[in-house]
Image: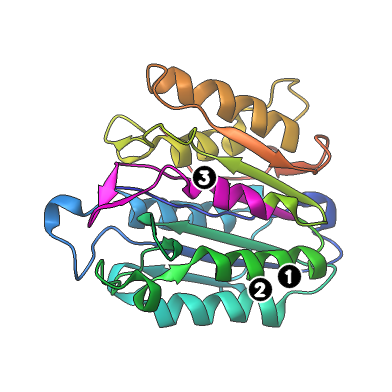
């Protein structure tokens, strides 16, 4: 089973003058305990591209000391967990924005739902993977403490890993959207759909991450006012992803963020997205 879970909290321009922005980007394409045919192609590239975009003026020029990129063998369960606590539970406050991007396998077994890290063991997800219950707790607390949160989840790149299925993972992620606070969530696909990746998406990305980057680079600015808003991001993602995947993938949104919130300033430099 190839399933990618991507979580992203975008810098909100409306609060840029009042607080800091923290970025955690995790991309895991290779897994120590999985055969290579179950490895992924582009999560590490997706995470690096998101971090690069967030460092650009268009997204608020997040400084290096407020950003952490973990890819492949650096993204162990302990490293990712420590980063979650550091960024979500330690540094960010009421005026701040937290950015979290995780691209990896996700899975569900009889004990719960998990994000796979580089060192996760398919025979013991409970002790070696990052549980969604823990992620739920951390994000829910962050929504209470942090000014704004946008959560993106890129899931379901195949059906099973070690006999476990992923149909219910989307429902677990959507529960995070019930947290009280300024939150926007986007899921990459419907529960029984696959989330696609490949070289056709910007030379090598997941279809969902590629569309997010395109949207924030200006493609989503429907009213041509020079900004990309939360509502425009939703509209673009939910129409572009089905278009570029021949109707095989349909993102969904959840949460309660005002559609007018500005996410990207197109008058400032960004990154090149094919």
How are the colours assigned in the image? Answer: rainbow
Earlier residue among tags 3 and 1: 1
Instruction: Name the residue rendered at 46%, 75% in the picture.
Output: 80
Residue 183, compared with residue 125, is above or below; it is above
Q: Is residue 172 magenta?
A: yes
Nearer the observer: mark 3 or 1; the answer is 3
Determine which residue is flagged by label 2.
Answer: 88
Q: Which residues are magenta?
A: 149-176
Marks 3 and 1, Cα distance to the nearest angstrom?
20 Å
Q: Secondary structure at mark 1?
A: helix
Instruction: Name the residue rendered at 82%, 56% in the picture.
Output: 180
Marks 2 and 1, Cα distance to the nearest angstrom?
8 Å
Residue 127, compared with residue 221, is above or below; it is below
Could you say which disc has been placed on residue 170 in the image? 3
User: Residue 95: percent from the left, percent from the top?
Assistant: 84, 67
Bin the neighbour count of mark 1 within 10 Å (Cα to Cα): few under 14, some 14-19, many 20 and up: some
> Can the viewer see residue 273 in this picture?
no
């Amino acid at each position: 089973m190839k399933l990618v879970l991507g979580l992203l909290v975008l810098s909100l321009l409306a609060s840029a003058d009042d607080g800091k922005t923290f970025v955690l980007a995790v991309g895991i394409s290779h897994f120590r305990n999985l055969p290579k045919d179950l490895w992924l192609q582009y999560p590490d590239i997706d995470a690096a591209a998101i971090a690069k975009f967030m460092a650009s003026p268009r997204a608020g020029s997040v400084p290096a000391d407020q950003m952490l990129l973990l890819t492949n063998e650096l993204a162990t369960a302990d490293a990712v967990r420590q980063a979650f606590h550091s960024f979500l539970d330690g540094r960010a406050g009421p005026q701040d924005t937290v950015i979290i991007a995780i691209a990896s396998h996700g899975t569900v077994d009889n004990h719960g739902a998990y994000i796979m890290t580089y060192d996760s063991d398919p025979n013991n997800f409970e002790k070696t993977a990052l549980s969604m219950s823990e992620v739920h707790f951390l994000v829910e607390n962050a929504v209470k403490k942090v000014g704004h949160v946008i959560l993106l989840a890129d899931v379901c790149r195949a059906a099973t890993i070690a006999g476990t299925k992923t149909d219910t993972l989307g429902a677990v992620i959507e529960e995070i959207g019930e947290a009280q606070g300024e939150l926007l969530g986007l899921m990459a696909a419907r529960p029984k759909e696959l989330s696609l990746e490949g070289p056709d998406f910007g030379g090598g990305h997941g279809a969902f991450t590629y569309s997010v980057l395109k949207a924030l680079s200006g493609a989503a600015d429907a009213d041509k006012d020079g900004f990309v808003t939360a509502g425009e991001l939703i509209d673009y993602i939910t129409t572009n992803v089905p278009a570029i995947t021949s109707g095989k993938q349909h993102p969904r949104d959840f949460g309660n963020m005002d559609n007018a919130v500005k996410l990207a300033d197109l008058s400032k430099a960004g990154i090149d997205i094919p």
